[in-house]
Amino acid sequence: MRIGIVGSGGVGGLLGGLLARQGTEVALLARGAHARALRERGLHVQGTIGELTVTPAAVAERGRELGVCDVVFVAVKTWQLAGVVADVRAMVGEGSVVVPLQNGITTWDRLAGELGDAAVAGGIIFVNSWVAAPGVIHQLGTLVRVVLGERAGGTSARLAAIRDLLVRAGVTVELAADVVLCSWEKFLGFEPMAVVGALSRSSIGTFRADAAARGVLVALMDEVVAIGRANGVALAADAATRRLAIIDGLAHDATISMQRDLMAGRPSELREQSVSLRALARSLGVATPVHDVCVPLLALQEAAARAGAR
C-alpha cells in the first residue's frame, strides 16, 4: 500500500515516520526548508515514544510529483487546506481513500465537495507533536491514536485495511460507527483548550489546575455541547464531564497546536475553528456568552499574524 501524506509537520511527519519505519512506502508533501531537510537528511522523530530516523520513499512540494497513492492523509492546518486541494487531487486515483486529520468540524465536507463524497472518509487523530526544526518532529506523551469511520456512518473494508496498516506501525486505531460524533467529542476538548491556553499563555497542566481558568474552560465546553446538540449531533449529557476527565490525564506541559501558533504570532486555525463555531451558533440560535468574550480578543492576534504573513 502506497501512503501519501499532505502536510508533513507535527501530525503528518509523525505518522509518516512510524509508517516508514515498518516498511510502508510513504510519499511526503512538504515545502521549503522542511522539504529540503527531509530530502537531504531524512525524517527524524524524537519524543516520549522513542527516536527514529527514516528515509521516505519520496518527498516533493507538489502532489503531481508524488503521483497516485492508495491512501492520502491530509494533515495540513485547516487554514492551509485551500492551498493543497490541487495537490490532493493529483494524488487520488480510482479507489484511493482520502483521510483528513485536521481538527475541527468542517474539513471533511470541504474536501468531499472538491473530490467527491466517495473518496473522502472521516479521520481524527489524538497526538501532541510539532516540527522542532526542519526535518525534525518532536512528540510528547504516550497517546498516538487515530479514529476512522465513513462519513455517512459505519465502517468499511477499506478503513479496516488502513487500520491494520497503522496498528502495525504502532498506532492505536478505532473504527467508529459514528465518526461525526467522535469529531465533535474531540472538538469539545480541543477548541476550548486552545482558547484558554492562548489567552492564559500557559500549558494544559497549568490552566486546568487554576480554579478560574478551569471555570472558563468548562463554560466554553458547555457551549460547544449546546451547539453540537442543536446541530443534530448526539453528544451525551455528560460529554463535557467525560472530556474534562481526559483533559485531566494529559501531560502537564502539553499545549494545543492552535494555541502554539497564536502565542508565536503565526497564522492559526482560529477562524476555521472558533470563529466558524460562533457563526454556527448564531445560525442555530444558541447563546455563547463566553466564546463571545474570548474569541474576539484572540481574533485581534489572528488578524495581526495573518497580516504579517502576507
Image (cartoon, rainbow, N blue to C red):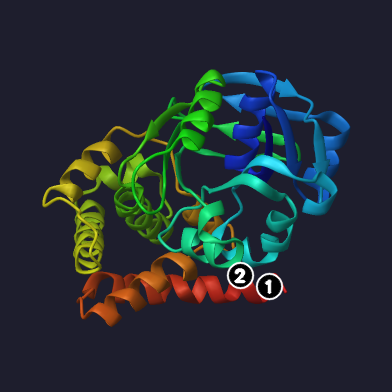
Residue 37 lies left or right of residue 180; in this view the side is right
Local crowd size for mark 1, using a 10 Å CA cut-off: few (<14), some (14–19), many (≥20):
few
For the residues bearing labels 2 and 1, Cβ distance under 8 angstroms:
yes
Which residue is drawn at the image coordinates 37% and 51% (left, top)? 190
User: Going by the picture, which residue comes out furthest to the front?
Assistant: 94
Q: In which quadrant of the rendered image does the C terminus lie?
A: bottom right
Which residue is drawn at the image coordinates 57% and 21% (left, top)? 169
Residue under pointer 1: 308
Q: Amino acid at mark 2?
A: Ala
Secondary structure, mark 1, is helix
Which residue is drawn at the image coordinates 38% and 35% (left, top)? 175
Q: Looking at this view, is 43 or 213 the one in front? A: 43
Residue under pointer 2: 305
Q: Looking at this view, is 16 or 240 the one in front? A: 16
Residue 175 lies left or right of residue 188; in this view the side is right
Image coordinates for residue 16, horizontal then vertical, percent: 65, 33
Q: Is residue 8 something one can see in this rendering?
A: no
Secondary structure, mark 2, is helix
Q: Is residue 215 something one can see in this rendering?
A: yes
Q: Which mark is residue 162?
A: none
